[in-house]
Image (tube, rainbow, N blue to C red):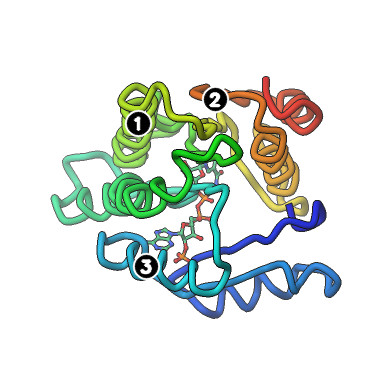
Amino acid sequence: MLSAGLQVAVISRDGNRLEKLKGFITPSHRAFLHTLVGDVGTEEGAEAAKTALLKSVGKVTDVVSSLGFSWWQGGPPHTQTLQELHRVFETLVLSTFTSWKAFFPLVKDNSNGSYTFITGGAGERLLMPGTGFLTLGAAAALAFCQVVREEYPDIPCKLNEVKINMGVATPDRMGPGYVSQLEVGEAIASVVEKRSISHKVLCTNSPADLKTMILEGKL
Ligand SMILES: NC(=O)c1ccc[n+]([C@@H]2O[C@H](COP(=O)([O-])OP(=O)(O)OC[C@H]3O[C@@H](n4cnc5c(N)ncnc54)[C@H](OP(=O)(O)O)[C@@H]3O)[C@@H](O)[C@H]2O)c1
């Protein structure tokens, strides 16, 4: 998106991670990247992040929601606590809700706007023994995206979900069943920029699917 000349804002709770991110961006594109320290996992935090963002960039046209964590394998349910289950839900689905509640009104009535959820296949199956809570949290996120699609069938903005049914890794850590985070990023950027579909779930099952998305902005 940066290479297409778009202004991109990234929110994180951790300023160090944002500084690291800036280091990956070529100097010519750095002026287009806005970083913001904020916690979108509460209604107040998400509202504060929205206010700060609008103050710094003026207008928001597209939102990509990719909240959660890459992996959870704490063990089978009988070894876990309710507190841990709360933490998993907070990370995967409650923050997806609180940030959506704050940011969706900025784009939903804009026919040139979009809201894109990133989800994963973990919600549909147990990926490995001991990953049950990941399945619970990811399944709740899938259900939330479905609810939003069905509760808002006629909104003009493009509302989509990109469901990645593979592991995502940095190019130096690729293995069987993994795709490159750079290609995933390009594919999501293409869906956002081309704005050719709405209310769809784009299930990406292979590197070939990602290539199609990069070229066409849909599957
Ligand atoms: N990684 C994979 O292999 C993979 C595969 C398929 C699908 N997915 C999907 O991709 C999505 C994101 O996962 P990921 O692997 O990219 O996880 P990640 O690397 O841990 O990134 C999650 C991001 O969410 C941010 N975040 C979480 N809660 C936040 C909050 N309350 N306020 C602000 N920022 C918050 C984190 O920022 P800070 O921690 O810096 O605040 C972090 O940058 C999930 O839906 C997952 O199902 C991932």
Left or right: 6 with respect to 78?
right
Q: Earlier in the sequence, mark 1 or mark 3?
A: 3
Quick check: 200 above or below 88? Answer: above
Q: CA distance from mark 1 to mark 2?
A: 12 Å
Closer to the eye: label 3 or 2: 2
Q: CA distance from mark 1 to mark 3?
A: 22 Å
Q: Which three-letter amino acid code belongs to the residue tagged 2?
A: Ser
Q: Which three-letter amino acid code belongs to the residue tagged 1?
A: Val
Left or right: 105 with respect to 19?
left
Q: Earlier in the sequence, mark 1 or mark 2?
A: 1
Q: In the rendered image, which residue does mark 3 sit on?
A: 39
Residue drawn where x is 20% and y is 48% of the image: 80
* Quadrant placement of the C terminus: top right
Res 77 → quadrant: top left
Q: Earlier in the sequence, mark 3 or mark 2?
A: 3
Q: In the rendered image, which residue does mark 2 sit on?
A: 198
Q: CA distance from mark 3 to mark 2?
A: 28 Å
Residue 104, percent from left and from top: 41, 46
Q: Which three-letter amino acid code belongs to the residue tagged 3?
A: Asp
Q: In the rendered image, which residue does mark 1 sit on?
A: 148
Residue drawn where x is 48% and y is 37% of the image: 119
Residue drawn where x is 66% and y is 48% of the image: 169
